[in-house]
Amino acid sequence: MTDATSNAPAIKGTASSLLTESPLMKKRNAAEARFRMYGVIALCIGLGFLVFLAVSILRNGIPAFTQTVVSVEFTLTQEQFDEAESKMLKTAAYTEIFVNGVTAQLQERGLDVPFDGGTIERLMGKVGGDLRSFYRDNPEAIGVPTTFELPAASRVERYLQGNLTREMVVDGRFLEAADLDVVDALAEAGIITSAFDWNFITGADTGVDNPGGAGIGVSVIGSFFMMLVVLVLSLPIGVAASIYLEEFAPRNRFTDLIEVNISNLAAVPSIVFGILGLAVFIQFAHLPQSAPLVGGLVLTLMTLPTIVISTRAALKAVPPSIRDAALGVGASKMQAVFHHVLPLAMPGILTGTIIGLAQALGETAPLLLIGMVGYVAREYPDGFASGLLDPNSAMPAQIYTWAARSDEAFFEKAWGGIIVLLLFLLTMNLIAILLRRKFERRW
Amino acid sequence: MSILKLTATTAVIALTATTVAARDNVQIAGSSTVLPYASIVAEAFGENFDFPAPVVESGGSSAGLRRFCEGVGENTIDIANASRAIRENEVAACAEAGVTDIIEVRIGYDGIVFASQIDGPAFTAFEPADIFNALAPQVMVDGELVDNPHTRWSDFNADLPDAEILAFIPGTKHGTREVFEEKVIAAGCEATGAFDAMMAAGMSEDDAEDACLAVRTDGRSVDIDGDYTETLARLDANANAIGVFGLSFYENNTDKLKVAEISGVAPSTETVASGEYPVSRPLYFYIKAAHLGVIPGLQEFASFFVADEVAGPGGPLATYGLVSDPELAETQNIVANAITMN
């Protein structure tokens, strides 16, 4: 603007040709070229970050999907079963019986390196729980040789992955340097192998001493129920509110005030909604702690403004001619909105909803306050009501919990969890795109 | 259509709100130091009993005890984990909210260790005085109490490495901080004579004790409010730094960390149990006695937690790094008979 006014007289005074570049022209072309370059640089930086992020997530997270397992044949006798069941810490008794059985079996078979029961115990993950639940579910397997694939200790896994070297091992109760010779021998004999870890996708959270058994499945269900609550509540409320505000409400100071408040709410930090949820839903309304229902309600509050704002934008984008035509052929205001305007605004509404849901899916802060972070995702809900009301965690909360644990194997699980979270998100986006394609109409 | 959905959802909400059944799982919250142990016991409890595994939340000792003291009822927690004993004012706050009968359960001991990068400078032995000289805002130099002038460890102790002072210590919401202050900083304060100098300068005993617990605020002492994994990540990025960890965390990460002796004693479960290693603290959980018999599995969980097979030597907690309490039998008696505090 200033350029144009200050330079205008100069142009008038000189006889310039369009074929030769005047200094001013050169300057303007250079400015444009520079600006394009800035754009490309910005794009490259953005892409660079994205590639860096994707590579590091995949590199760190992929190992979480495979597991080092010890596959051995093992027979549990009826006496051993009864003896283990009579103890208080039954799982430890199962572990002991298993370790003794495997040690005897391996000694008979003969390995080149010396080992004892203690070695085998250190090399195994926590197997007692798996064994007990297997034999309780399959009593007919007692006394019958059964092949088990049970997780190895996390340090054995890290050693085989190359993340733990012999020099780094400090002899302790978790692992001794001499144990690694046994690991090598067992790997050579095909007893220690690597397998796809279905349990990571379907399993529940475990105690801190059992990284081999931890899975993200239960918290995926928790996230699913939360998203269900968010969708079922925020979509109808948000769309109804925006239709009223956009199409029916009178324009006055009161509706202006509401509009300003909605815009402000969209910018409120999520932790604030967590505190609100704790005070209103748990302490006042007495809803259960750590329940996905409460998590969903809190996230609904967070998502509503996003949906209202995007829905209103989508309604505004529908040309007035559509409304006028509908009214012109005798439709009532409500018929015009629901039969003509709303279907045309649907793609925009869906986009807004998915953005809001995606935001809610990745939220951890409000969940901290309503008790969904910690050792929470312990078991699958046994029905719809239990899915809403029984304590459960959510994917981002589970990732946060794992990242804070001292055993490095959990850190890997956290990266794996990020991959699952991103896949969940991609699926949601895919559904939104498909729905949008279906509803999209051009004029 | 959306109106139909709306009514349907209100109906669902109303339905679920009325069918909130009696809670059938134990709810626990509190110290992030006790959390690993509690999660181990919770998982084992779910595996070994027909009760659902308890929910164990994190958040810190103070936050856990605050929630514990919110009142009695199904929507309050049953057990608070704490890495320090409950305070007088917390007991009072509890009583005010109707939580009058509290059972204190000591599960064992935890050592607090000073560790640094395994390839970093040779931080192999400290005295409490060294830590005080490095981290206090005011220290004794040539018999005078002055603002801390030290920037390198070798400035005040030639035996220590010539490295920049940088320490990552637990933030104030952690129970660990209190132990760190009392057993290390305060001990160093007295050992270097700073305490006496403060008294001589006309401070009252209480003020001097408080002043002794302060740490410098010029960025050489960094509070970590997160978990030990955060401290570990900060150490990874700073070769010269030392960090404060729990003994069990260190033992799980011996391939990355090396630990320093305090007053000539190396930390281990043995030296902590015998009391030789000076920086250790008991770990607790607190049970709301009013919830016993109301919340299914609470009594069983508490008894299971302190059973010899679990919390005793050789149990899963000791394997993970908890130092077993020599007086566990007494604790078992307290839990079995629901003996409340006082």
Image: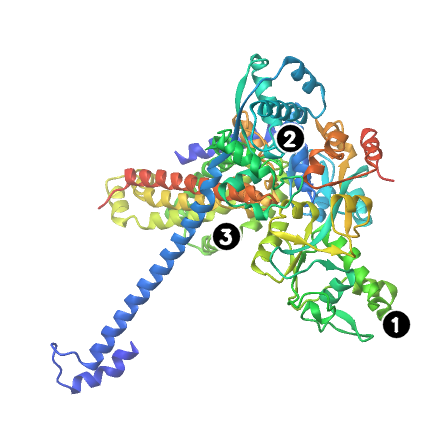
Amino acid type, label 2: Asp
**Residue A414 to residue B148: above or below:** above
Residue A54 in the image, given as x and y percentages of width and height: 41, 49
Have a look at marks 1 and 2 and say if they share a chain.
no
Is residue B300 rendered to the left or right of residue B4?
A: right
Mark 1 or 2: in front is: 2
Mark 1 or 3: in front is: 1
Q: Residue furthest bottom?
A: A13
Q: Which residue is mark 1?
A: B200
| Residue nearer the viewer, B126 or A130 | B126
Q: Which residue is mark 2?
A: A116
Is residue A376 rendered to the left or right of residue A68?
A: right
Have a look at marks 2 and 3 and say if they share a chain.
yes
Residue placed at 53% from the left, 18% from the top? A146
Q: Chain of mark 3?
A: A
Q: Could you give the CA–CA distance between mark 1 and mark 3, rounded to whole angstroms?
A: 57 Å
Q: Chain of mark 2?
A: A
Lower position in the chain sequence, tag 2 or tag 3:
2
Residue A156 in the image, given as x and y percentages of width and height: 55, 38
Have a look at marks 1 and 3 and say if they share a chain.
no
Amino acid type, label 3: Leu
| Residue nearer the viewer, B214 or B13 | B214
Within 10 Å of disc 3 (Cα), the crowding (few <14, some 14-19, many 20+) is some
Q: Chain of mark 1?
A: B
Residue placed at 23% from the left, 45% from the top? A442
Question: In the rendered image, is residue A297 in sight?
Answer: no
Residue placed at 20% from the left, 77% from the top? A25
Secondary structure at numbered mark 3:
helix
Which quarter shows the N terminus of chain A?
Answer: bottom left
| Residue nearer the viewer, A260 or B146 | B146
What's the image's color scheme? rainbow
Mark 2 or 3: in front is: 2
